[in-house]
Image (cartoon, grey):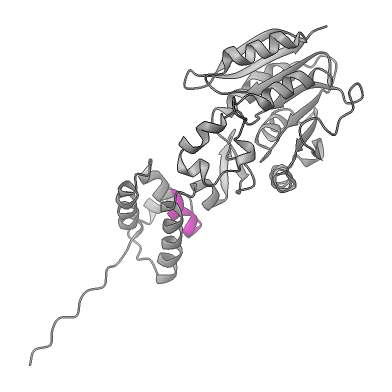
Amino acid sequence: MQKAPTPKRTVWTPLALVRWTADYFKTHHIKSARSEAEILFARTLGVRRIDLYLDHDRPLDPGELADYKALIKRRITREPVAYITQHREFWSLELAVNPAVLIPRPETECLVESVLPFLDDPADGPKRILDMGTGSGAIVIALAHEHPEHRYLASDQSASALRTARQNARTHGLEPCIDWCCADWDTAFAPGRARFDLIVSNPPYIRRHDIPRLQAEIRLYEPLSALDGSEDGLKCLRHIIGAAHRYLNHGGWLALEMGFDQKNDVSDIVERSGQYMDLRIIKDYSGMDRVVVMQKKE
């Protein structure tokens, strides 16, 4: 009696698996499906994305397939790729990220760019810079990477966030020029004693009623304390603008990230404070108002 043919076992290769995953992600309405499939698979194999195609027809072993399947399951629950891979690139620097910190965004690089001319100026020697609400340390690490000759202080109310930021600074050899402070905004500083030449911050600025409408990746996974800017989205911006002049040296600068539609409100807060001059609004790479820069009045 003739035996029934044995079903052939599917042999998965990197190229075939990336293609299948990209199609699967699309059915779950995940944007950038192909690139995310590549990122997660490269993470599984511990290689660069380009290496997936240099060895594209290699059969994968069961352990590799099981590890990759676990990452796919996490992603379709809308967990951000950055939290799955535990890193995100910012300012061409690889940073560790986790659910204790906001995932750095490209638009925040505009905040870094906006203050570099001030740090480029060698006048008056090394400057003192404060990064309020540092999170992953993206801003302060980018600035220190460009100008390690200055002295930096990074603060955050979350001890877990500070541990992540310090790890990132250590990774890039920048911890010697950065001090750390666990505090809620300016609560650890005495007016007139803490003096800085520049204060930067990317504070929470999303209106509370807008948070349920954010992408699931953001509202379900990223820290609410780094998103919620109160009912009008301006609470933290209002506080920082109202307090920062007490800690700035004469002629010092304050630079803040803000919501794309908050230009008029923030400008009004600055004007009402009466403490600043030379107000500037800077657009992000999408042409949206994103950064406000101001100088303390003499």
Q: Residue at x 63, y 37 (%)?
A: 226
Q: Position of residue 42 (x, y in %)?
A: 46, 53
Q: 198 above or below 35?
A: above
Q: Is 44 one of the magenta-colored residues?
A: yes
Q: 41 above or below 107?
A: below
Res. 62 image quadrant? bottom left
Q: Position of residue 148 (x, y in %)?
A: 76, 31
The magenta-colored residue range is 39-47
Judged from this view, the residue extending furthest toward the left is 1
Question: In the drawing, does residue 157 fall left or right of residue 101?
Answer: right
Q: 88 above or below 240?
A: below
Location of the N terminus by quadrant is bottom left
Nearer-the-camera pick, 266 or 166: 266
Q: Main secondary structure of the magenta part?
A: helix
Location of the C terminus by quadrant is top right
Q: Position of residue 286 (x, y in %)?
A: 47, 22
Res. 16 image quadrant? bottom left
Q: Is 260 one of the magenta-colored residues?
A: no
Judged from this view, the residue extending furthest toward the right is 193
Q: Residue at x 51, y 57 (%)?
A: 46
Nearer-the-camera pick, 72 or 266: 266
Q: Residue at x 47, y 59 (%)?
A: 45
Nearer-the-camera pick, 283 or 236: 236
Res. 293 image quadrant? top right
Q: Position of residue 255 (x, y in %)?
A: 69, 20
| Number of numbered discs on residues | 0
